[in-house]
Amino acid sequence: MIVAEQKSMDDLKRMMKGKKKVLAVGCGTCVSVCFAGGKKETGALASALKTAAALDGETLEVEEKTVQRQCVQEFVEPLAEDLKDYDAILSLGCGVGVQTLAEKFPETRVLPGLDTQFMGQPTEPGIWEERCVGCGNCVLEYTGGLCPITRCPKQLFNGPCGGSENGMCEVDTSLPCVWSMIWDNAENLELTDTLMEIRPPQDWSTSRSGGLRRTVVRDDLHQPSAVGKSPAPSSAPAQPTAANKPVDPGANWTKVCAAADIAEGTMKKFAVAGVSVMIANLGDCWRAFPPMCPHMAEPLEESGFLENGMLTCTKHIWQWNLRTGEMAGAAEKPMLTYDAKEEGGEIFVSADNELVYEHEEEEELSDDDFFSAG
């Protein structure tokens, strides 16, 4: 994960100079785990900044919000509503989060509250160590999963240097020599012969030396609001699918809301006959479906993005054309739907039986999982 730490109070006070009202934005992923920019840290920093300003005889109002991920534009978009009231945004996200906010809100000053350090792992309670520099040309296949680029100060490719002694690094004797670790486990992994082969110099063209890097997984994996355009609805003839199946004339209908309650191009979650249902207004039709993504039970009211009839779960970019039921993006399961209709300006849904997906389980990690040593 990305590891960061908060900037010094002196640096933060300097950035706040002349500001009257600031929005501190936390991030609920990587920097939350390393106790740098989660909801708790954002609240504590906001209080500290207000207190520091008061001690200096100044007035500073700091409000705080925490989004699930600052590095995805869909998650920061709701911040736009009140930005005109603030002099600046103080981002407690990594450098990617800061830039996401700056690109999304170019008319608002975005300030970094953290120093981004590296990609690493927790090795002891409260201690993170670097494990990856993102060189773009991974050699872990040849080294038993241990990285000599990151963990060897000399970035050696063909074994330990002459200064390694008793399995400890010459440059920092408190650290184990990664090459000693690699060799100690080579026989178990049947890597001895591989390690005896001379490795050529690393190809650094895949690293930062080549400038800005971009990865395109597939052309149809995209985030509509991030690229400024939406996927065009399919021109193929619609076939009866989970999304446009004929309405059951014998269905039991429940009145949910007025049609005017759901603006065109938006969706809302309701309880229908004791079942949670998401209802989308596509303009020319209505769709009702379970409020959880078929992939890993991601709540669509938080991670769902609807545009031109295309629903995107921004967590893993699964997509569905709600008009035709066609899957797009990375989607591997269809979107199940309930019957829905509009009559007399009211929306009715038939949801007598709850539709349930067989989700892939994503293991919940506790603090013990993160901080288990050895």
Image (spheres, rainbow, N blue to C red):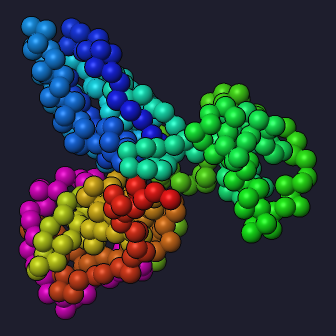
Q: Within the magenta stretch, is there residue 181?
A: no
Q: Residue at x 28, y 42 (%)?
A: 38
Across and down, in percent, residue 87 comes to: 22, 18
Q: Which stretch did the figure color magenta? A: 240-266
Above or below — where is 170 with respect to 276?
A: above
Q: Is residue 336 left or right of residue 281?
A: right
The image quadrant that residue 144 belongs to is: bottom right
Above or below — where is 27 with respect to 62?
A: below
Q: Residue at x 11, y 12 (%)?
A: 55
Across and down, in percent, residue 33 comes to: 36, 48
Q: Within the magenta stretch, is there residue 254?
A: yes
Across and down, in percent, residue 90 comes to: 28, 26
Q: Residue at x 42, y 28 (%)?
A: 115
Q: Is residue 29 visible?
A: no
Across and down, in percent, residue 272 comes to: 13, 75
Front one among 364 and 154:
154
Front one among 303 and 50:
50
Q: Give the farthest residue toward the front.
A: 166
